[in-house]
Image (tube, rainbow, N blue to C red):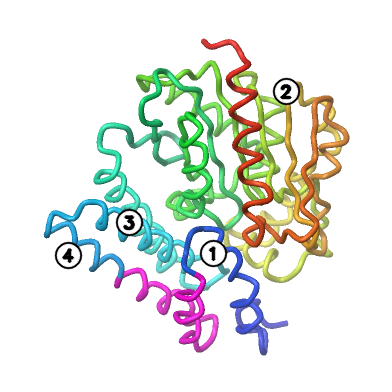
Amino acid sequence: MPSFIDTPGITPDFIGLNRSRAVGAGLDPFAYDRVTAGVPDLHGWPPVLAEAARAHLAAALRAEADGLRVTAAAEFRTAARWFHIATVLPHPDTDLLAALEAEADAATGRALALAEPDRAERVEGPGFAGWLRRPAGVTTPPVVLVAPGLDSSKEEFHVLADALLARGLAVAAFDGPGQGVCAATSAPEPAYHRVVGAVLDRLADAPGIDVGRAALVGMSLGGYYAAESAAHEPRLRAAVAVSGPHHLTWDELPPFVTDTLTRRCGSPDAARAFAASVDLRATAAQIPIPLLVVEGGTDVTPGVTTAAAAAEAAPHGELLLVPHGDHLLGNAQGDWLPHTADWLATRLRATRGS
């Protein structure tokens, strides 16, 4: 059987399926169509999208040199998005993917240095790296951690972070083991509460935020990470799982997922073991805090049981189902993102600070 990226005729389907994801990440849909029209096959996906990223990087540098800070920051952020979206497939050139994620991370840092020089700072530690952003004009805000999924990274969720910041919440978006800028040096961690605990330990040293009012949002596989962490990390006050799995059945998973897991985990056996560990059947009922599960009604992946079951089993679980939403609901942001951001803000403001 060919690898996923060598599947005959797969390129147009992959481009179509990832359009909503790219738009949800903040890329212009017309730019996406124009750039991906030049993708010859999936082996060519990373270099073609990286070329688009570097065009925005060059524009950012020109604007920065001319003192146009707002434009430069926006161009750096757009470059970061393109660099990351260039990596979202199980490509055999792992060194190339690692280099592109490093460029995405660096471009995000340059964007924040221009747009939020007094409110953003690097946060990193064992197994994670990301950025803490503080809302303007808010003293000691609560903080929301944002966890990516299997092949996503913090650069994919700037729109989510902006929605939370607009509601007076600080945001710590990070890459964990096997994710984003950390993927080159680590494998995915099913006991993700350990990663969340390390991030919270680091945030305890960051001035101007209230770690006693912390929440976690997880995207895609990160939705499982959010629910798992909600059951085991006592410092969390609320959690949100967006398009997350409840459990996985390896033999039914599509090649995109199994190939990606195998490359991220390092071997087929490690990938199978990881997939078997993604299971909330015994965990969801142990979640003591409010859990919001966000699902798209058209998000159907073989071998993946959605986290809707966790919303029913969790003592304080809620389900937000958007019937026309796809995976990560990039085609329906207005139907879930404002509600989710308000849900988090309301619950964190109701909790007692540290």
Q: Earlier in the sequence, mark 1 or mark 3?
A: 1
Residue at point 35%, 51% (across, down): 108
Amino acid type of the residue tagged 3 in the rendering = Ala
Residue at point 50%, 86% (across, down): 37
Amino acid type of the residue tagged 4 in the rendering = Arg
Amino acid type of the residue tagged 1 in the rendering = Val
Q: Which sits in the foreground, 40 or 93?
A: 40
Q: Residue 15 location in percent, x, y? A: 59, 77
Q: Which residues are magenta?
A: 29-55
Labels 2 and 3 touching (C-beta < 8 A): no
> From the viewer's perspective, is residue 221 above or below residue 226?
below
Magenta highlight: main SS: helix
Q: Earlier in the sequence, mark 4 or mark 1?
A: 1
How many other residues sit within 10 Å of disc 2, few (<14), some (14-19) or many (≥20)? some
Q: Which sits in the foreground, 264 or 50?
A: 50
How many other residues sit within 10 Å of disc 4, few (<14), some (14-19) or many (≥20)? some
> Cα distance, mark 4 to mark 3?
12 Å
Residue tagged by mark 1?
23
How many other residues sit within 10 Å of disc 3, few (<14), some (14-19) or many (≥20)? many
Residue tagged by mark 3?
74
Q: Earlier in the sequence, mark 2 or mark 4?
A: 4
> Cα distance, mark 2 to mark 4?
48 Å
Disc 3 secondary structure class: helix
Residue 289, numbered label = 2
Query: The N terminus lies in which quarter of the figure?
Result: bottom right
Residue at point 60%, 70% (across, down): 18
Disc 1 secondary structure class: helix
Residue 219 lies left or right of residue 119; in this view the side is right
Quarter of the figure with residue 227: top right
Judge depth for marks 2 and 3 and give the one in front.
Answer: 3
> Cα distance, mark 2 to mark 1?
32 Å
